[in-house]
Image (cartoon, rainbow, N blue to C red):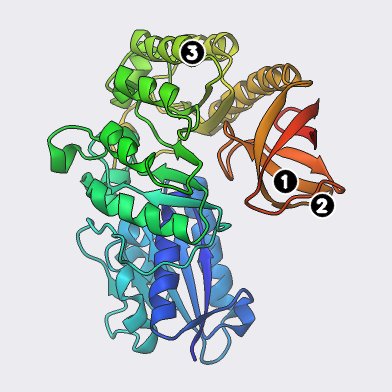
Amino acid sequence: MIKVGMISLGCSKNLVDSEIMLGILAESGAEAVSDPKKADILIVNTCSFVKDAVKESEDTIREFSRKKTPGQKLIVTGCLVQKQKELLLKKFPGADAFIGVSEFTRIGEVIRAVPVNKLLVSKPGYIYNKDTPRVLATPLHSVYVKVSEGCDNRCNYCSIPSIRGPLKSRRFEDIASEVRNLALIGAKEINLISQDTTNYGADIYGKPALVRLLKELVKIRGIKWIRLLYLYPSRVTEDLIELVASEKKICPYFDIPLQHINDGVLKLMGRKYNRAKAEAVIKAIRSRIPRAALRTTFIVGHPGEDKAAFDELAAFVRAARFDKLGVFAYSRETDTPSGIKKGQNSEKTKKERFSRIMSLQKIVSLELNKAKVGSKMEVLVDGAGQTGLVCRSSTDAPDVDGRVLLPRNAKAAPGDFIRVKITGASEYDLSGSPE
C-alpha cells in the first residue's frame, strides 16, 4: 500500500481540492499518513494568491525537496503550478511532478507512474461533483462545499481568473445531493464557498441563482447551519437578505470583501461598485437583520491609494464597526493591470497602512465583544483546546473568525450544539460557561 502525505496550503477552496485528491488516492488503495517521514509520496498543494502565499508555497516545496528520503517522491499541485508552470521546473528540479488545477484528478495514476513530462498543466475549468471521491480534512460536523470554480469579475489586482479560469458552476441538484450525503454522515454546518458565491449559477442559468440554491438546501434534514462565504458587494440583493432573515438555517453572517471604500481606488481596482453602493448594502443588512455579523476584507497600498484615500478608508473602518475584518497589504502581480500600473506604493507604506487598519479594528472588535458579555447564545462545539472546549457561534466562520472558549469541566462533544452564557471577552475570542 502506497503511503501519501498531504500538505494543503492556502484557502478553504484549495482545501477542498486536497480532500478530493485524498479521496481519489483512497479509492486507488493509497493510505494517507500525517508524518511526512513515513510517506512514499509527498504532495504539496500550493497557493499563489499573494506574495506571502507564494513564498510559503516555495519554502514548503524547498523544505520537502531537501528532506526527501531515497525512493520518496514529491508531487507539487495547485495554483502556483498553474501560474508559474515551467518556472517551477527550473526552480525545483528535485520535485518529481507538477500538476495544475484541472489535472489533480489524475493524482492516482501519477503516484504510480510519474510521467516523463513532469509538468501536467492544461486550461483551467475543472469542477467536482457529488460522485467525486473525497476524504474530509475538516471535522465531520463542519464541511466546505464548493458551489462553483473560477471567476468572471476580473478585478485589476487579481490573477485568480487566469489561474482558475472563468466562472463554472455546479448544478443546484448536484450540490443538494452532495449536502444530503454529507448530512447522512454527520455534517451539521455547511460552508458554501467559491471565488464569488453571489455569482453562482450565472453561467448555467442565465443569472445568479444563489437564492434558488439556498431554498433547496434549507430543506435538507440534519443540516442546522448554512454559511455563505465570499459575497460580491453589488450582488448582495434584497432577495438574498430577506432569505437570510427568514430562514433560521442560514447563518446571519455576511462575508463581503469590500477591498476599499474610496471611489477612486475602487475604480482603479476594477471593482464594479462605489462607496454609496457599499454603504447601502451594509445599511440594508443591518436594518433587516440587526443580529447579523458583517465580515469584510480590505487591500491597503494599491497603486493610486494616496494618503487621502487611505485616511478615508481608516475613518470608514472606525465608523462602520465591522464584526470581523481582515486586511491584505497589496501584493503586486505583474500579470495584472494593477501590477503594471505606475505609482506603486512602497513596501514600507503598505506595512504601515496594514498595521494602522488592524490596530483600529482591534479596538472595534474588543468593544463589540465586551458588549456581548452577559448575553446567551447557541454555539457549535468544534473540539477540545488547551484550556477547555473550543466553540463557535453562528456568526463565527471556521478558521478565520473568533471562538467561544468554555472551561475544562464543560461537557459536550464535537458537533454538539449547546447554549452558553458569555462571561468574558478579548479582542477576538469570547469565553463562557454552559447554561
Residue 258 appears in the picture as rendered: no
Element marked by disc 2:
loop
Name the secondary structure under disc 3: helix
Task: Give the Cα separation between the discs numbered 1 and 2.
Answer: 9 Å
Disc 1 marks a residue whose amino acid type is Val
Three-letter code, disc 3: Arg
Taking 338 as reference, is 241 above or below it?
above
- Toward which corner of the image does residue 323 lie, by quadrant? top right
295, above or below 54, in the image: above
Left or right of 191 on screen, residue 429: right
Question: In percent of the image, x 37 and y 77: which residue is there?
Answer: 97
Residue labelled with disc 1: 390
Residue at position x 36%, y 7% from top?
276
For label 2, the residue is 386
Q: Earlier in the sequence, mark 2 or mark 3?
A: 3
**Residue underneath mark 3:** 286
- Observer-nearest of 339 and 147: 147
Measured Cα–Cα span from mark 1 to mark 3: 28 Å
| Residue 235 seen anywhere in this rendered image of the structure | yes
* Amino acid beneath label 2: Gln
Residue found 34% across the figure and 12% down from its top? 277
In the image, 59 versus 18, the foreground residue is: 18
